Image (tube, helix red, strand yellow):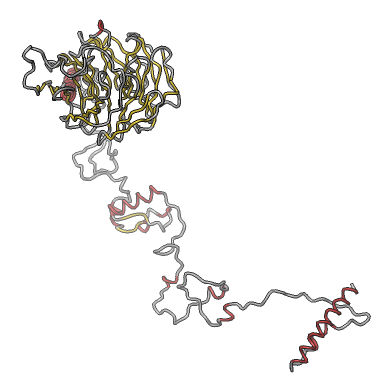
């Protein structure tokens, strides 16, 4: 400790010598007290070290700007004012107009509300009573003294006259003719039985007699039948022939396959090699609304059948003049699907008016109509030659219904799907058919057996509202709602071919029909943007994309006898031929 003090003293001496040098230079005198702690200690003395505050002294703003008042209108202060400054009285004279009410404490805009609990019903009851009769209970008066006139505010006389009853307790005055059972007039408050009391003449549990009930039932049945007939009556069928002569000089109709188009349409021969279509060569116009589906005439493909949302079905020539041959009118709502029989002499149409209709392609006559009061979403003839009188339809009520066209009766129902049935496709030499549904599943059925023997559903699967069988009968192309075309085997196990997935188009929400080129080289499909997409079958690469329609391109068909002719239709009401 002594050594420490000595060192401090020596340090102080050195600094003292410096100070002396400075003091000699300056005329100012040095304060002896300032150097007292640096003198050497005498024997027996102890030195106490004082605590030094090394922080610089900073002047407080109020000390610097003395007398400056803090403006109460300021929103922001750049220093920390003291409590006294913040709550100092305002400058200026006393407000002569300041009343006691203004000076009183307030916790709301209109004054000070004391905490109180009032039942919501009681408050509403008194408010309505006051607005109706002009009086209400005084809330400031103790409830025990409510019998006196002082317990009411407003029209006290009216309150005494009505014995203080509220608006809910006083009967309605206006309905004088409504006399209540077991009590006089409705004005008689004591005998009032409420708004749902019975009339004097009313019987307890009055019911019509048996004769009256029978008569009522007949009337209601007639009304229901009349309304149903008006709503669901089939539209009147008619047809319009657009060509000058229905038959040529040899008596042949337009169903006759032309021989002068450069290729043999009578056989089912397919071209050796197909090519990509490049340009538009024709547009068929005539539909006033979007086209739902198009189908080529069986085998030859020299005629094209189209159905539309304008409730009409039209038949067009594919070769020569490419005229509209005939219009079929017979549905009251949009036509959803169409299907030729094997020979093309008849076709079936399915529409949103809940009717399926069988038409004669040549004469335009409606042969018969079928309905089960549900909307048919798809329809297919059985392709077997000996079963041409049978057809199946996928319905909105989750069933696949099989009809006999000769008798008009339902002969079978396939009821296993959990959603509306979208497609039906015959496979395996027509012994089986595949159906897809809104339940995101694919089911395979044996003909005439109403239990599916194959059920395909994965958590990753989406609904597949359009399915096409390949020309060689080995594959099913399914338009999936996750913007890709899936390929399933169509012969034995119906397994998904994971190597053949076609992507690159946008179809979510639309049942865009898929098709194959006749030589199985290409896959074609429309999309939601109105484009025609063409993929290579082997590599699944998107080869070509054509802007075909202004709205959704809902269907694309590759002509079975042509190397590069593709027909598309869209919701812009147009049907186009590409080559």
Q: Is residue 356 visible?
A: no
For the N terminus, the image quarter is bottom right
**Of residues 331 and 138, which is closer to you in this image?**
331
Q: Is residue 38 left or right of residue 225?
A: right
Residue farthest right in this picture? 43
Q: Is residue 212 left or right of residue 464?
A: left
Find residue 318 and report its horizontal and vertical position in percent: 18, 22
Q: Residue at x 42, y 23 (%)?
A: 500
Q: Quadrant of residue 453?
A: top left
Q: Is residue 416 visible?
A: yes
Q: Residue at x 24, y 9 (%)?
A: 388
**Of residues 301 and 47, which is closer to you in this image?**
301
Find residue 38 and report its horizontal and vertical position in percent: 84, 82
Q: Quadrant of residue 307?
A: top left
**Of residues 535 and 154, which is closer to you in this image?**
535
Q: Is residue 397 left or right of residue 60?
A: left
Number of labels in the image equals: 0
**Of residues 204 and 292, which is closer to you in this image?**
292
For the C terminus, the image quarter is top left
Q: Is residue 56 left or right of residue 74?
A: right
Residue farthest bottom in this picture? 27
Q: Quadrant of residue 47?
A: bottom right
Q: Is residue 27 above or below residue 326?
A: below
Find residue 203 and report its horizontal and vertical position in percent: 23, 27
Q: Is residue 364 above or below residue 140?
A: above
Q: Residue at x 25, y 43 (%)?
A: 188
Find residue 5 and report its horizontal and vertical position in percent: 87, 76
């Amino acid at each position: 400790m002594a050594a420490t003090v000595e060192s401090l003293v020596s340090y102080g001496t050195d600094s003292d010598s410096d100070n002396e040098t400075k003091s000699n230079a300056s005329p100012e005198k040095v304060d002896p007290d300032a150097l007292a702690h640096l003198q050497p200690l005498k024997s027996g003395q102890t030195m106490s070290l004082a605590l030094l505050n090394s922080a610089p002294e900073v002047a407080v703003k109020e000390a610097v700007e003395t007398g400056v008042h803090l403006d109460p209108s300021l929103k922001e202060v750049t220093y920390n004012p003291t409590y006294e400054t913040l709550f100092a009285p305002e400058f200026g004279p006393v407000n002569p107009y300041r009343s006691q009410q203004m000076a009183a404490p307030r916790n709301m805009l209109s004054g000070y509300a004391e905490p109180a609990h009032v039942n919501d019903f009681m408050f509403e009851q008194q408010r309505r009573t006051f607005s109706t009769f002009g009086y209400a209970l005084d809330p400031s008066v103790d409830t025990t003294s409510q019998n006196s006139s002082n317990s009411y505010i407003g029209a006290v006389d009216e309150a005494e006259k009505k014995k203080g009853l509220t608006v809910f307790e006083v009967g309605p005055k206006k309905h004088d003719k409504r006399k209540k059972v077991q009590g006089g007039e409705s004005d008689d408050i004591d005998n009032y039985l409420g708004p749902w009391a019975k009339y004097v003449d009313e019987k307890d549990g009055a019911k019509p007699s048996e004769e009256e009930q029978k008569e009522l039932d007949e009337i209601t049945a007639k009304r229901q039948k009349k309304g149903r007939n008006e709503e669901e009556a089939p539209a009147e069928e008619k047809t319009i022939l657009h060509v000058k002569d229905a038959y040529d000089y040899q008596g042949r109709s337009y169903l006759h396959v032309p021989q002068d188009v450069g290729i043999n349409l009578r056989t089912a021969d397919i071209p050796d090699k197909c090519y990509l279509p490049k340009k538009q060569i024709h547009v068929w116009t005539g539909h006033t609304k979007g086209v739902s589906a198009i189908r080529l005439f069986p085998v030859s493909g020299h005629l094209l059948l189209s159905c539309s949302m304008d409730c009409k079905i039209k038949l067009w020539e594919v070769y020569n003049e490419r005229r509209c041959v005939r219009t079929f009118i017979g549905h009251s709502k949009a036509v959803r699907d169409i299907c030729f029989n094997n020979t093309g002499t008849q076709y079936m149409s399915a529409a949103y008016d809940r009717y399926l209709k069988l038409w004669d392609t040549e004469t335009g006559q409606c042969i018969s109509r079928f309905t089960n009061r549900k909307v048919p979403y798809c329809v297919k003839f059985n392709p077997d030659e000996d079963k041409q009188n049978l057809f199946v339809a996928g319905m909105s009520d989750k069933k696949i219904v099989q009809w006999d066209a000769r008798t008009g009766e339902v002969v079978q129902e396939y009821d296993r799907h959990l959603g509306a049935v979208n497609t039906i496709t015959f496979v395996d030499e027509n012994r089986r058919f595949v159906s897809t549904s809104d339940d995101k599943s694919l089911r395979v059925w044996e003909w005439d057996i109403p239990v599916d023997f194959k059920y395909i559903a994965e958590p990753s699967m989406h609904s597949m509202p359009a399915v096409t069988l390949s020309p060689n009968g080995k594959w099913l192309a399914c338009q999936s709602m996750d913007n890709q075309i899936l390929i399933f085997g169509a012969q034995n196990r119906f397994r998904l071919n994971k190597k053949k997935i076609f992507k690159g188009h946008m179809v979510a929400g639309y049942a865009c029909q898929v098709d194959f080129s006749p030589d199985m080289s290409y896959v074609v499909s429309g999309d939601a943007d109105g484009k025609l997409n063409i993929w290579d079958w082997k590599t699944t690469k998107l080869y070509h994309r054509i802007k075909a329609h202004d709205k959704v391109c809902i269907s694309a068909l590759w002509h079975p006898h042509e190397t590069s002719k593709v027909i598309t239709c869209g919701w812009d009401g147009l049907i186009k031929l590409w080559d």
